[in-house]
Amino acid sequence: MKWIFYHLGFLFFTPLMAEEHVAKKSYTLWDAFHMPENIEENGHLIDWLFNYTTIMITLFFIFVVIGIVGFCYFYHHKRHPKALYTYGTKRSQIIFATVIGTAVFFIIDINIVRISNDDFTKVFLNWPDETKEEVIKVEVLAQQWSWNFRLAGKDGVFNTEDDVVSTNDLRLPIGKKVYFQVTSKDVIHSFWIPNARRKVDAIPGRITRMWMKFTKEGKWDIACAEMCGTHHYLMKASLTTYSNEDFKNWLTQAQNHSLAENDRGTQDIYWGWNWN
Amino acid sequence: MAFFEQHIHDEPTNFLKKYIFSQDHKIIGKQFLWMGIFFLGVGGLMALMIRWTLAFPGQAFPVIGQFLFPDTAGVIPPDTYAMLFTMHGTIMIFYAITPILIGAFGNFLIPLMIGARDMAFPFMNMASFWISFVSGIVLLMGLFTPLGAAASGWTSYPTLSTLIGDPGQGQTLWTVAIFMLGVGSTLGSINYITTIITLRAPGMGYYDMPLSVWGLFMTAVLNVIFLPVLGAGCLLLLFDRLFGTTFFLAGAIATNGSGDPVLFQHVFWIFGHPEVYILILPAWGIVSDLLAFFARKPAFAAKTTALCMICITALSTLVYGHHMFTTQMSPLLTQTFMTLTMTISIPSAIFFTNWLGTIWKGSIRLDSPMLFALGVVFVFGLGGLTGLYLATVTTDIYLHDTYFVVGHFHYTMAASVLLGGFAAIYFWMPKMFGVKMNESLAKWHFWLSMIGLNGIFMGMMIVGYGGMHRRLYNPFVYDFMQNLIPMNLFITYSAFLMGAAQLIFVYNFIATLISGEKTGANPWNVGTLEWTIPSPAPHYNFKEIPIVRCGPHEFGNPNLPPGKDFQYQTEELVKV
């Protein structure tokens, strides 16, 4: 008997205690809803399309709800005892259904496809061109359960002994295009920077690509978005975005550091690949 | 139309032959129903454990936690958490929804609604149930292996599901179980298709079939085409695990020749996307029928609804690539799949128009099956429309693998299919067991479930929009998700409300079976063939094979004599 009360108490009071714990920091309603802050030049494209889709489908859904609730009220058998005898096959009714179907397709869907396709091909797949501007190249190797990052060293060539290699710690400048090449050592992971709105899968045996241009200095989370085993949730890295000057200082320091400290004898530091 | 002689054999008197290894479609349907409800309970309990972990990480699961996880004093450990969500997904999709809607109602309704005495292949029907049953046991056996059950998600992407990521026997058993279930469901589906094509009562054309049968028919077609594909994928995965082949290994881990892990994703999703429609089509059919039955009005453009089902069935085979946008397929494929996915909204929009057209100017009776059917229209509206974000490549790049996806597919697959299943149970209970469920408890069940499931799945979409990704043991190790803690608490409370609401159903169901109100042959005043025979349906259903003379939704014909607002399908259509 005592045992039952113990567990009942547990069932009811644990949630209350947890709530108290949460209540320490108070959140407004907006805090509980919003997306992570956008720190990427083209992140607003995704946000804009999200909001546009939301408005469109909300309008459509409101019609559906008005239909369900309104018809159930006005045509309830107490108010409307005699149903209309129709098969819905009159010319006007068929035209009505067809118009709705095609209107949804052309007004909502095709618009979204067009905008999304423009963003996708003209922006996200418009890979940075090294001959025209300075591009920061980063090689990302995912493994259970951490992220390895590699920036080319002073020689500008990957997989040499002066590369700047780090685990779970990525530092990049703002205002410059950053070009990632991503792969995985063991299982499929997904390289995700929530604040930059984009992710790309890290797949063993192939290299996937993503480019970004950060606009805000600060410290942000990098996460693995694809289930990759027991400690998937701990596969977390930090992204630090520096101003250009700070980044240069840090890079020089890091390059010197890696030249001095890298153990050139071990094969472990040569996990990179030739940039392609 | 060919007519086949359907013999009447004597009812078996032996208990084993009558109730266990029965070849009677009604008994097999009930067996599937029990199996489905059992697994629904197991999967639901797993869902509660998952929700508990997400809201109260590091706290002991109440009441039963101490027994299930004694090593950690009741706290769900991270590896068990991975097993829980894997098994929850697998069980709910393959062992709860599939048996209830396709197994139970497919078996029970198809012969009764088309005026047949049994399925075309009764023995195959029995084999289908028992293979599924054994496959369920194989799946659960995984829980008792040393390294525990499968833990790589219900999608089981290699290389996580190969020996590289999951060396335990649980994953092997999972693969075997899914393969077996595929065999069982394929047998069942071949049976459904043959029965519908050959055993329709004389006079019944394809468009005279109730829309429920149409939904089940299309489901069976998809099952027959795509379950073998999944079976092939499972076999290859099994070879990788047991015989050292490398179909799905690549990169540094492929020391013995190289395959491609993305290949499995293609194989899986070419089955996996139709699977969504496999699950939802029976519910659509049932809803289309129920709306007409309870609005006392012919189904609006029933032929168009059936044609839309065919159209969606065809389209569903062409869109699977939208599950793989982040694997960086060729941009041409990405654009193609995005556009094709969007075309599905044309038949879907026509569906909604027809559903609303059916209740427009009806004489609506809000009995519990009607409430559940309207609930399906509501939740499927939300689920279908939020699919737009995920079909669009740029928004999908943000939302892929977040809780937004989880919320979306639970709306379409869990909420609408569950509500559709409950609608079917409440509606056909009189024909299955000869008793009617308690109506006010059913309404409580409906409203509490509606509040609960909308709280859960809407909440999931909101946290997904906030950036919370899937399958995290403890999301709050991330800084950017701290603000999502209150919403996660809310979802968990909603989940417990939803769970409690199902207890009302279980009580109502059992109490009705024990001492329910007996009903006559046709308690709902509906004219389809199953209501022309006594309740519960007798052995071999129809003493004489009925002859069909009109459509399934003949309500409110002004030429009917006063006091009567429907006619049976066996009656000649009343004209002036």
Image (cartoon, rainbow, N blue to C red):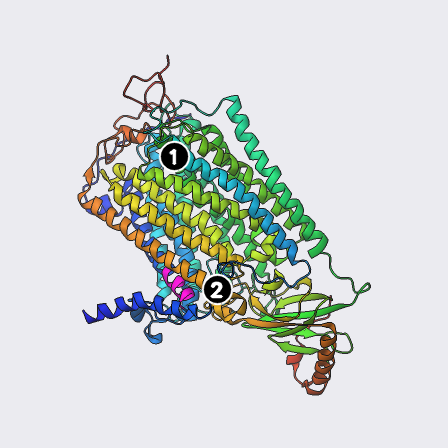
Per the rendering, the mark at residue B301 is none
Viewer-side label of 1, 2: 2
Above or below, B497 relative to A267? above
Residue B401 in percent (x, y) is at 53, 59
Quarter holding the C terminus of chain B is: top left
Magenta segment boundaries in residue numbering:
B48-56
Q: Nearer the viewer, residue B433 or A46?
A: A46
For the question of whether residue B119 can be seen, the reply is: no
Find disc 2 in the rendering and name its residue.
A27
Q: Say what amino acid the circle numbered 2 marks.
A: Tyr
| Amino acid type, callout 1 | Cys
**Residue at image mark 1:** A72
In the rendered image, residue A137, in percent from the top left (x then y), is placed at 72, 69
Q: Is residue A35 magenta?
A: no
* Mark nearer the N terminus (1 vs 2): 2
| Residue B201 located left or right of residue B334 | left
Q: Cα distance, mark 1 to mark 2?
A: 39 Å
SS at mark 1 in the image: helix
Q: What is the quadrant of residue B554 in the picture?
A: top left
Please tell me which residue is depicted at 57% across the width and 62% down the height of the picture.
A36
Name the image quarter holding the N terminus of chain B: top left
Taking the view exactly as shown, the residue that stands out farthest to the bottom is A260
Q: Secondary structure at mark 2?
A: loop
Which one is in front, B243 or B64?
Answer: B64
How packed mark 1 is, by other alpha carbons closer than 10 Å (few <14, some 14-19, many 20 or more), is many
> Is the residue marked by circle 2 packed among few (<14), some (14-19), or many (20+) residues within 10 Å?
some
Vertical order, A229 against A267 (above or below): above
Q: Position of residue B572 (x, y in %)?
A: 34, 18
Q: Main secondary structure of the magenta part?
A: helix
Quadrant hosting residue B419: top left
